[in-house]
Structure formats: structure tokens, C-alpha cells
Amino acid sequence: PARWSELIFLCIGSDRVTGDCLGPYVGYQLFEHLDAHGIYIYGTLKEPVHALNLEKISHQIKLLHPDGLVIAVDASLGQKKHLGYVTIANGALYPGAGVQKELPPVGDIHITGIVNIAGTVNAPDYPSVYSNLTGRYHHTGNLKLYEFFDLFVDAFCIKTIFLKQSNCRA
């Protein structure tokens, strides 16, 4: 559309696999800190969007938010020198590509955090952890990455609150 009327964060990953919980972690943080009309979050630590329900949730988003801008957030694999880097790009995200899963492309824009080295580990080899979140959860190997997303969430929420209070348009 010429103008987006809603903003949708589609945060992909599993709360049960440490290396794949970046999306749900960001979704959880946004959900906890953001209360704004026209912004929707799919995928949190409590209700993750993962390989088994991604197609259903993606279809649901298209039906409920036809004029929404979808920002897909996910963990990714990359080169060792890029561990902890964040990528932001225009276009769809291809979740699961790094572990040879064929899932539907999602999002209009995507944000990924490189959490592990490509080609060295398969998803079942990641440490399996169910995080019953009582405080802030950080995967110790990627603390800087999670700190970045904490700042992203904080900055996004502050900007949203400012725009809401001042009736400005982004």
C-alpha cells in the first residue's frame, strides 16, 4: 500500500532452544514495554512463532492486518567474525534457511541477529533450554546482541510514546 496503517512485529524462534530464542525474546520485550494503538506483536517467549505455526500465523497476519507493515525478527547464522552483528534489510525474511528448513518467506522488512556460526551446528545440537522468564533473559554467548535489542526496544518504545503524546506522524 501507499501508506501503512499498522506496524506488525513478527518475532520468530523457539523459547525452547537457546540459540533460536532471539525473536521471541525481542517480542517479549516489545510486548512488555509497548502499549500503542496500531502496533501488534506476534511471537513472544510465552507464545512463540516457530516452524510449526509460522504459516498459520503469517496467514492470520495477512487477514487481520492487510495494510500492515510486517517487520520479521529472527536469529540467524553467519561467519564467526560476524557473531553478534545485527542485519536490517528491506524484503522478506527466509526463516530456517540457515538450517536447511523450507519455510515461507515473511515480512516486508527483516531484522536478524547472528547468534552462531553457519555450517557448524544443526538446530537439534543447540543447547535446549526452556526459559521460565522471571527477569531478563540473556543468552550468555551473545550478551552484546541482546543488549542491542534491549536498546532497540527501549528506543522504539520511547519514540512511539513521544509520537502518540504529541500526535506527530512518523
Image (spheres, rainbow, N blue to C red):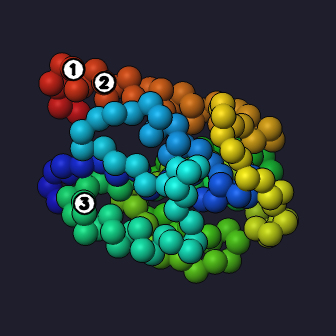
| Image coordinates for residue 169, horizontal then vertical, percent | 17, 31
Task: Tell me the residue that label 2 is attached to.
Answer: 161
Residue at image position (71%, 58%) is 16
| Image coordinates for residue 96, horizontal then vertical, percent | 62, 70
User: Where on the picture, by quarter, is residue 38?
Assistant: top left
Residue at image position (44%, 26%) is 155
| Mark pair 2, 1: CA separation | 6 Å
Quadrant that contains the C terminus:
top left
> Considering depth in this image, is 125 or 82 the residue closer to the camera?
125
Residue 12 vs 101, above or below: the answer is above
Asked if labels 1 and 2 touch by Cβ distance under 8 angstroms, the answer is yes
Amino acid bearing label 2 = Ile
Task: Tell me the residue that label 1 is attached to.
Answer: 165
| Mark pair 3, 1: CA separation | 24 Å
Earlier residue among tags 3 and 2: 3
Secondary structure under tag 1 reads helix
Whether residue 72 is visible: yes
Dot 3: few (<14), some (14–19), or many (≥20) neighbours within 10 Å?
A: some
Q: Is residue 140 left or right of residue 1?
A: right
Q: Is residue 19 left or right of residue 59?
A: right
Q: Is residue 50 left or right of residue 41?
A: right
Residue 88 vs 144, above or below: the answer is below
Quadrant that contains the N terminus:
bottom left
Amino acid bearing label 1 = Gln
Task: Tell me the residue that label 3 is attached to.
Answer: 65
Earlier residue among tags 3 and 1: 3
